[in-house]
Amino acid sequence: MDRILSLIREHDVIILHRHKNPDGDALGSQIGLKHIILENFPGKQVYMVGDAAGRYSFMTDSRMDEVKDGVHENALAVILDCSATHLISDERYPKGKALCRMDHHLFCGEIAPVEYVDSSFESCCGLITHMCMEMGLKVNKTAAEALFTGLVTDSGRFRYDATNARTMRCAAFLLEKGVETEEIYRNLYATDFEQMLLRAQYTLKVRFTENKVAYIYTTLEEMKACGADEFAISRGMVSVMSDIKGVDIWVNFTETERGVLCELRSNRYNINPVAVKYGGGGHQKGSGATVKDRETAMQMLSDLDALMGGNT
């Protein structure tokens, strides 16, 4: 923590990166750290880069910045919530004058000379919040709401087993900054009727392997026909299988123009090695990968079935 804060103090220009296809934790980390830096170190120029916020665009200051080539050369590049280089949004990060990383995923290898990586945290937002609490940094309402959003989404509304007493202390710290939870929850979890119908359709698509791994496979034609974006299907529909009695591993496969998106989940077992085998990563019980075709996706499913079979 000290080394990262030292780098922030030393650089007038700071560029915040995170993983592609951002979730609430990736965006919350970016937005939260940006406003923490501006609040505690006045005069800094802080930019956020990456692809669009998508369904998380309700978050205050979620619009990414257009950063011209050459700006990185005199800047500190900070990578947030990302465990692998090929997942980093905006590939110019190595051009930074200095580079550091803050992350909570399982360690897959060094990305930056200075790193604060701790997989015991339920979220990168929780890690950043804890840093602020430990170092006495000021956190304004905008930062607190962004960090709370990431804390909530990556902890599964405080249901995942990575949630602990420290998680709740971080949440309490952020709530004391004036976070309006009703507005956050409404934007995160309010469901329109079309979404309800889509979830009902996807419930009917659930299938099971021999060892009761639940899975859904959506072809490119089906994905286009439903009218939803690919991440609303891949990430949004994986939770359809999360509370099926007797199912401890589930996976959602979604075909896209660039490959098959694979969202792997478990409530008991470490499925991360399977995701890593296929070029992905994440957490022990929640990981993702993108594979080239349906055949490879079915090989992954076979590996998950074998994992389940070996634990029954």
Image (cartoon, rainbow, N blue to C red):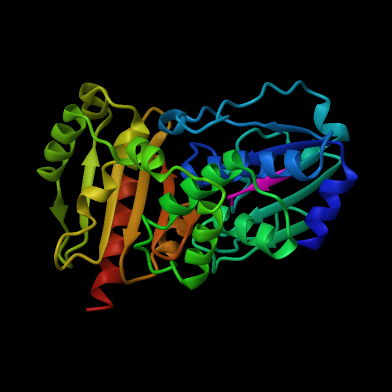
**Image: magenta residue range:** 78-82
At x 20% / y 59%, what residue is drawn? 243
Which percent across, then down, holds residue 125? 56, 52
Residue 293 makes an appearance in the image: no
Q: Nearer the viewer, residue 75 or 62?
A: 62
**Residue at image location 45% in from the left, 71% down from the top:** 164
Q: Is residue 28 visible?
A: yes
Q: Quadrant of the N terminus?
A: bottom right
Query: Relative to 144, does residue 115 appear above or below in the rendering?
Result: below
State the count of labels.
Answer: 0
Q: Residue at x 54, y 42 (%)?
A: 146
> Looking at the image, which is closer to me, 207 or 192?
192
Dominant SS in magenta:
strand
Q: Position of residue 139 (x, y in %)?
A: 65, 48
Q: Residue furthest left?
A: 204
Left or right of 310? Residue 90 is: right
**Residue 198 painted magenta:** no
- The one nearer the camera, 55 or 216, is 55
What quarter of the picture does the C terminus occupy? Answer: bottom left
Q: Is residue 276 left or right of residue 124?
A: left
The percent coordinates of residue 241 (x first, y second) are: 21, 53
Identify whether 116 is placed above or below 235.
below
Task: Please give the name of the residue rendered at 41% of the width and 45% of the height, measured from the top-left corner.
Answer: 181
Q: Does 115 sit left or right of 303 as displayed?
A: right
Image spot of residue 154 (x, y percent)? 44, 53
